[in-house]
Amino acid sequence: MKRKGNLFEQITDFNNLRAAYLKAVKGKRFSNSALIFDLKADENLCRIKKELESGIYRIGKYRQFKIYDPKERTITAARFEDRIVHHAIMNVLEPVFEKQFVFHTYACRKQKGTHKAIHYAFKKAGNCKYFLKLDVRKYFDSIQHKKLKELLFRIIKDRKCLALLFGIIDSYSVSDGRGLPIGNLTSQFFANYYLSPLDHFVLEKLKPKGYARYMDDIAVFSDSKRSLKNILDEMQKFIEPFSLLFKQPVINSCRNGVPFLGYSVSDRRISLLNRTRRRKTRKARKMAYEFNQGLIDGAKLADRISCMENAVF
């Protein structure tokens, strides 16, 4: 595997930093941090560039809050300047990560996403008798910093770039050098890449009839329950060095529906799981209340409705 170099200069290029700023400010233009930064945007971007190049740039403190949809999670928000740096990094590194992914991993990738993953699962449910459904217990909290750094070192040889990435990784931990902050753009790509070796292992060594992964949600397809049990055993052994554990696995008939990404995908149809339906109903009622109370305008309401419609088949 050829390691990629000459990345840091691309990341710190002023035009890249400015493009990253425009991405970071999208949807945040009227936040206090964005407004303050915007007063002297070019001057601030030059300062970030100099701090990055001199090696004195430091990740700031995170702000944390909880969300409860679809389940309780702690979201960790980086300061505005750090979000610019995250975008600058991913503007350059996204193609590097893309080369590592198998075709049927669907998170954080252009021309992929939830819909493509569900339609692939629907196709496989129609061609296979059985499925194995897996997801990782507390995935983001379980990611081991040391292992992630080893994986990044395999594909990147630019030492300044690696030092920047390692600084972001070390800026947050749940315990014992583990965990990525849910909320960082970089975390999404790190987490998706962390399981990429598993994708290659399953497809190149175990060779099931079908395989799809969306972050830590995994669906495997076969015509044999025994084959799926063997695949499960091999996958569990494989992820042990990654400090990961699967939740209770499910092996069942595709006719009964594959519970994948909030949907039940059978050989005949795609339907919302009951918990997903309840969640969308709560969202619709909340939007109606906020609109009637004048908390959101018509444009914002239309935008949210469009987002909900795009998530329904």
Image (cartoon, helix red, strand yellow):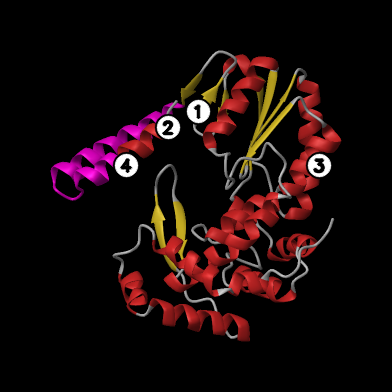
Q: Quadrant of the N terminus?
A: bottom right
The location of residue 310, given as percent across then percent down, is 41, 34
Query: Which residues make up the magenta segment?
Result: 273-302
Residue at which label 4 appears? 304
As drawn, the label of residue 51 is none
Foreground tag (3 vs 4): 4
In-front residue for pair 74/23: 23
Q: Could you give the CA–CA distance between mark 3 and mark 1, rounded to whole angstroms? A: 26 Å
54 displayed left or right of 224: left
234 displayed left or right of 59: right
Residue at the limit of the structure toward the front, as seen here: 15
In-front residue for pair 55/4: 4
Foreground tag (2 vs 3): 3
Foreground tag (4 vs 1): 4
Q: Could you give the CA–CA distance between mark 3 and mark 4, rounded to whole angstroms? A: 39 Å
Give the residue at x 64% y 15%: 126
Callouts 4 and 1 close, C-beta under 8 Å? no
Q: Could you give the CA–CA distance between mark 4 and mark 1, rounded to whole angstroms? A: 20 Å
Q: Mark 4, residues whose alpha carbon is within 10 Å: few (<14), some, or many (≥20)?
A: some
Residue at which label 3 appears? 201
Q: Mark 3, residues whose alpha carbon is within 10 Å: few (<14), some, or many (≥20)?
A: some
